[in-house]
Image (tube, rainbow, N blue to C red):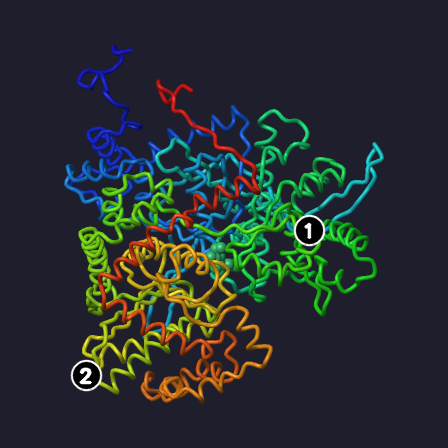
Amino acid sequence: MTSLIPPGCPTVLTEDDRTGTSIETLRRAFMDNLFFIQGRFPEVATKNDYYLALAYTVRDRLLLRWLNSAKTYRDQESRTVCYLSAEFLLGPHLGNNLINLGLYEAVEEAMRQTGLNLKELLDQEEEPGLGNGGLGRLAACYMDSLATLEIPAIGYGIRYEYGIFDQEIRDGWQVEITDKWLRYGNPWEIPRPELILQVKFGGHTYSYTDDQGRYRVVWEPHQVIQGVAYDTPILGYKVNTANLLRLWRAEAVESFDFQAFNTGDYYGAVNQKIASENITKVLYPNDEQLQGKELRLMQQYFFCSCALQDMIRLYKQSGNKDLSRFHEKFTVQLNDTHPAISVAELMRLLVDEHLMPWEQAWDITRQTFAYTNHTLLPEALEKWPLDLFGSLLPRHLQIIYEINQRFLDQVRLQYPGDNDRLRRLSIIDESGCRYVRMAHLAAVGSHAINGVAALHSELLKQTVLKDFYELTPQKFSNKTNGVTPRRWMVLSNPGLTRLITERIGEDWVKHLDQLRRLEPLAEDRDFAAQWRSVKHENKERLAAYIRDRVGVTVDPHSLFSILVKRIHEYKRQHLCVLNIITLYQMLKDNPQLDMVPQTFIFGGKAAPGYYMAKLIIKLINSVADVINHDPAVRDRLKVVFLPDYNVTLGQRVYPAADLSQQISTAGYEASGTGNMKFALNGALTIGTLDGANVEIREEVGAENFFLFGNTVEQLQELWRNGYRPWEFANSNPMLKRVLDLIGSGYFSHGDTALFRPIVEHLWQNDRYCLLADYQSYVDCHQQVLQVYQDQAQWTKMSILNVARMGKFSSDRAIREYCQDIWHVEPVKIVLPATSYMTP
Ligand code: Z15
C-alpha cells in the first residue's frame, strides 16, 4: 500500500482526517475542507467559507456515527419511533453538534491556533426556522433526547424552502421578510435524489371486483407529485447514536412534464412544475390560528404519504413480506393534528395498495399511531371543509366515511339512542357547513392520546375530547413537556454550566435530576456570589446586543424582566404593558420614588394576518418610545422590543433573565416550554396557574415562585356569573387611568384611534380576562421588586429554582413516551475499531 503514495505525502496518518478528534487533526481537516470543499486559500476566505469548512469537518464526525447507527438498526431490525411533525424548529446545528460530540473545547482551540474565533464562526450559521414556536421547538428537543437516550428514531417532516419569516420593526410595526435560509447552502443535510416517492392529488375513484373476487378501489389522480428526501443527522449527547431527520421536498414528476410537452403545451408543463414545487415552498406562519388553505392540506398529506411509504419501504427492506407486523417495527407519534391524515393514508396503503382486509388494516393502524394534542383553543382545532377535502383527497374521504361509520356503529352499541353523543363524536361535523374534524380522526385512529402538561391533559378530558375520554378512558395520559439541557443550558449558558459542573460534576447534563445536589449550596455565600456574577455577565452580553441591534442602552444592574414567545392575545403581552404603564404612572406621580431599576424585554412574532397581535407589537414599541425618552423616569424603567425572536436569540435571552413572565390566562397555554428554559437558567417566574407553570411551581416550591391571577375554576365562575370587565376598570382608579392614557393618544402622538381596538376590546369583552387579573399582577410584581432588593434572598431562590428543575428535561418526557406509549428500548451503537469505510 505504502508504495502507492506519491513522494512527499505523509505515509502514516496518526489519526484519520475525517473521524479523528485531536486538535491537530481537527485543524488539518478544517484546512483541507477549506481548500477542497470551499475552494479557497485562507488569505481570501470569507467568514462564511470558514464556517462551512468547519461545518463539513464536524459533519464528517457525525457521518461516522450516523452510518453506523443506521447499519445497527438495520442489522438488529430495531423497533423505531417515527415522530411526524409539520415543524422542526432546530436552531443552529454547529454549536449543538460540537457540544454533543464533546468537541467544543478542542475545536475552539483548533480555531484559535488557526487565528480564528469559534464564536464568530458560530454566528455565521443561518438557523433553519422550520417551525413557528413551541410545537416545532418541542419536536427538536425530542429529537435530541431520543438520540441521547439511544432510541432508534426517525423524524419526518417538510423541507420548507422558506421557513418562518424574519421580523423587522419599522416605525414600531412588524414587517415580514422572507427567510432565505438555504441561500448559502446547507452543510447539515444530505439530499437523496434517488430516494423519491410519488404522491397523488385530486381526481376520482372507481371500484371493481378483481379476478379473485375482491372488491378493489382505484384512485385516478388529477396530479402526481414526487417527494425527494433530504436527510439530517441528529446526534445524541456523548453517545454514538445519530438518528435521522428526513424532510421531504416536493418536485414535479418528470413524465408529467414530458406528457404535456408532447401534446405541445410547454408552458402548461412549466406551470405544472411550478405548482408541484409550491407545496414545500413556504411554512405557514400561523401559530394556533387556522388558515384553512388548500395548500396547507396538500403539505400535510404530502409529507405524511412520503413518510408512510418510506416506512413501508424500510419494513420490506428488512425482509418482511406482508405488512401484518408493521406496528411491531414502527410506532408513529402524531405531533398535533397536522399529520392526522396519516390515519387514512395508512389505511389506504394497506387496503388499496397491499390488499389487506379492512379489519386487519384497522388493527394495525390503531396500534401504530398515538396522538399528542397541543391546544384547547377552538380556533386552532383543525377542520377541513368537506368539498375541499373531497376534491383533493377523494379516496381518503371515502375511507374516513368508512372509519366513521364503523366507529359510530360501536358507539351506538354502547350508548343506544344517544344521537346527540353520536353527533358530538362523529369525525364529520354536520352542524352547518360540513367539515372533517382532524382531532377526531386522530383520536379514533390512535391507541394513545396525550396532553402536554398535567392541567392541560385534565382539561382535555373535560372539554374538547370529553366524549372520547368517556368512551376510551384508558387511551388518555399526560406527558408533560420538557426541554433539552444540552442546547438550553450547556450551549447557551457556558458560565452557569461551568459553575454547576465544578460543584456537582457533569452527570446532570444527562440526568437533570442531579441538579438537586445544588440545594445545599443555596446557603453558600461564596457560591451565591459566583452565581450572581455569572448572571451579571450574561446580562452584560445581552445589554451589549441590545445596544447594537436596537440602539437602546440598558443597565445590566437593573432587573431584567423578559417576555419572549409568539404574540397572541391569550399570552397577554398587553397585560405586561398595563403593568409597565402603571409603574410609569407611579414614577410620574412621585418623581423621587425609590423604585428598583427595571428593564422590560419583549420578543416574538405575530402571525402576518393577526391584526390584534400586530397592534400589540406596535403598542409595546410606542410605550417603549415614550418611557425610554422621558427624563422623569431617570433610567429606572426601560422597555425594549427585540426584533426577530428565534432560537438563536433565545439562546442569548434565557441566560440573561432575572424574571420570567409567564402570564397567560389560566387554561389557555397548553404547557409552555419557554417557562422551563428560563427557570433552568436561574430566572424566577411571575406566572399564572396555567400549563406547566403549575408543575414548575410544585417542583420549585410555592415560596420560590411569584403566583398571581385567577385559577381556571375562578375564571369559569367569573364567566358563569357574566364577566363585566368594565366593572373592574371603573372600580380601579389606576387601571382606569392606564387604559385612558392609552386611549388618549399619549403613546401615539395624540392619535386616539390607533390603540382603540385594544382598549375597547378590554373594556367591552376582554376574552382573556386581563382586567380581572390586573390588580393581582400589579401587586405580585411589587412583591417581586421587594424580594429583588434582597439580593441574597433572590439568589437563594434562583439557585433553588435551578436545583429543582430536573423534571423538565426532555429526557424525562421521552422516557415516559418510551415506557407508556411507544414501548421501545435503547439500542447501543458501537463504532467499528478498524476503518469506517469497511463495515
Ligand atoms: C404551538 O406552538 C402550540 C400548540 C399548537 O396547537 C400549535 Cl398549532 C402550535 C404550543 C402550545 O401553545 C404550547 O403551550 C406548548 O408548550 C407547545 O405547543 C408544545 O407542546
Q: Which residue is mark 1?
A: 472
Image quadrant in which the C terminus is located = top left
Q: How many marks?
A: 2
Image: 754 above or below 813: below
Return the residue nearer the eye: 623 or 536.
Answer: 536
Q: Nearer the viewer, residue 509 or 293?
A: 509
In front of the other: 517 or 810: 517
Q: What residue is drawn where x is 50% and y is 37%? A: 153
If the image is split into quadrants, where does the N terminus sit? top left
Residue found 23% across the figure and 45% down from its top: 498
Give the vertical position of 814 relative to 762 (above or below): above
Image vertical order of residue 259 relative to residue 589, above or below: above
x%, y% of residue 676? 39, 55
Q: Can see residue 211?
A: yes
Q: Secondary structure at mark 2?
A: loop
Whether label 1 lies within 8 Å of ligand 1 gets the answer: no
Q: Amino acid at mark 2?
A: Gln
Give 315 or 728, whichever is nearer the viewer: 728
| Mark number displayed over residue 550 | none
Quadrant position of residue 379: bottom right
Whether tag 1 and tag 2 are in contact, CB under 8 A, the answer is no
Q: Secondary structure at mark 1?
A: loop
- Residue at x 34% of width, y 57% of height: 678
Give how far across and how far down residue 659 sits, in percent. Answer: 31, 64
Q: Mark 2 sits on what residue?
A: 592
Q: Earlier in the sequence, mark 1 or mark 2?
A: 1
Pinpoint residue 88: horizontal percent, then vertical percent.
Answer: 45, 49
Q: Residues within 10 Å of mark 1 (few under 14, many from 20)?
A: few
Position of 417 with respect to 551 (left or right) is right
